[in-house]
Amino acid sequence: FQVKANMCPKLFLLDLCLIILMKSNYVESTMETSEPRAQNLTVFQRGLCDKKATKNDILLNHNTYYSYTNDTKIMTQVLGFLEISNDNSYIEASRFIHKFAKLSPYELETRRSGPQKYHISGLGLIRNTKRWAEDLTKSNRDLTIFPILRFPNWKTPDILALISSYGELIELSKELIRICEENDLDGLILDVWSGFYGKMPTSSLTFIAQEICARLRMNLKQALILIPPIYANSEVINREIFEILAGVANYVILDMYDYSSSWRPG
C-alpha cells in the first residue's frame, strides 16, 4: 500500500528513495499533482519488497496502494505514527486504519509549572479532531489511540524536584491520568529518555517511567515506553533495564529509525 511521509514516518523506509531524487523535475511534478491510485496487485506482487527493487520502481509506485486496504499480512499488533500536517493526513489514516491496532496521531508536552503543578500542552489538536478519532475507532473497533508524551527543556530545579520528591511524581501521574480521562485517550506513549537521559541518573529515570506506567495501568490506561533511536541502538538500554520496563509497561517500543536532522542529513 501507499507509503507517505505524513502517514507513518517511523514505520517505513521506502521514502528514503524519494529523498535521493527530490531534485528531479519529474519527481517534483508527479508528487505534487498526482492523486493516490488504487491497484489490484500488492506491493509483494509488484516486486517492491524485493531486494532487487530499484529507486525508479519506488518512484513510479510511490503514489499507489493495494485496493483491498482491509487486508494485512501482519498477524501481530502494529503501532502507526501519524503526523497530521494537512487534511490529506486524515484521509490517509482513514483509508489504512485497518492496518493498525494502535495509532499515535498526537504529540503532547509536559512541563513543571510550580510545586507539584504540571502543564500539558498540545491538547487543542486532540479536542479539535475528536470526531475524526471517534470515526476511526468506529471503523476499526480494535483500534486504540495514544499520544506521545514528551518532556522537553526541563530546567535543572524542576528535574531535581521530580527525582527528590515522591509527591511531585504522584501529582504528575495524576495530571496525566486526568488528561487521558477527559480526552477519552486509551493511554500514553512515554518518551522520558529523550527528555531526561544524561540529566538524571539512569536509576531515577527508570523509576519515573515505572511509577507513571504503574499509575496509568491502575487507572485502566495503557502505558507504552518509547526508546528513541539514539538509545535503542546503543548500550544505554541493557537487558536489566529492558526487563524492568517490560514488567511495568504494556509495550516497550525500541525505535530503531527516525529521520536524520537538518544539520546532519543522510
Image (cartoon, grey):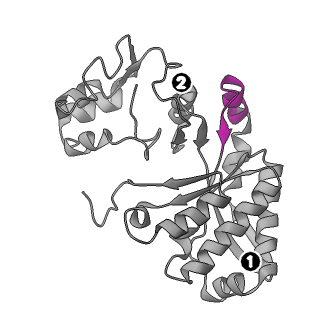
Residues at discs 2 and 1 in contact (Cβ within 8 Å): no
Name above or below for residue 230 compared with residue 20: below
- Residue 110 drawn at (x, y percent): 67, 67
Name the quadrant containing residue 6: top left
| Residue at position x 26%, y 45% in the image | 19
Number of numbered discs on residues: 2
| Residue at position x 60%, y 69% in the image | 151
The disc at residue 238 is: none
Instruction: Say which residue label 2 marks.
Output: 95
SS for callout 1:
strand
Magenta span covers which residues? 132-145
Q: Which amino acid does label 2 sit on?
A: Arg
Name above or below for residue 41 compared with residue 99: above
Q: Which of 118 and 24 is in front in this view?
A: 118
- Residue 185 drawn at (x, y percent): 74, 46
Instruction: Say which residue label 1 marks.
Output: 113
Quadrant where the N terminus sits is top left
Q: Nearer the viewer, residue 170 or 175?
A: 170
- Residue 34 drawn at (x, y percent): 34, 23
In this rendering, does residue 179 appear at all? no
Name above or below for residue 60 compared with residue 199: above
**Residue 169 relative to residue 258: left or right:** right
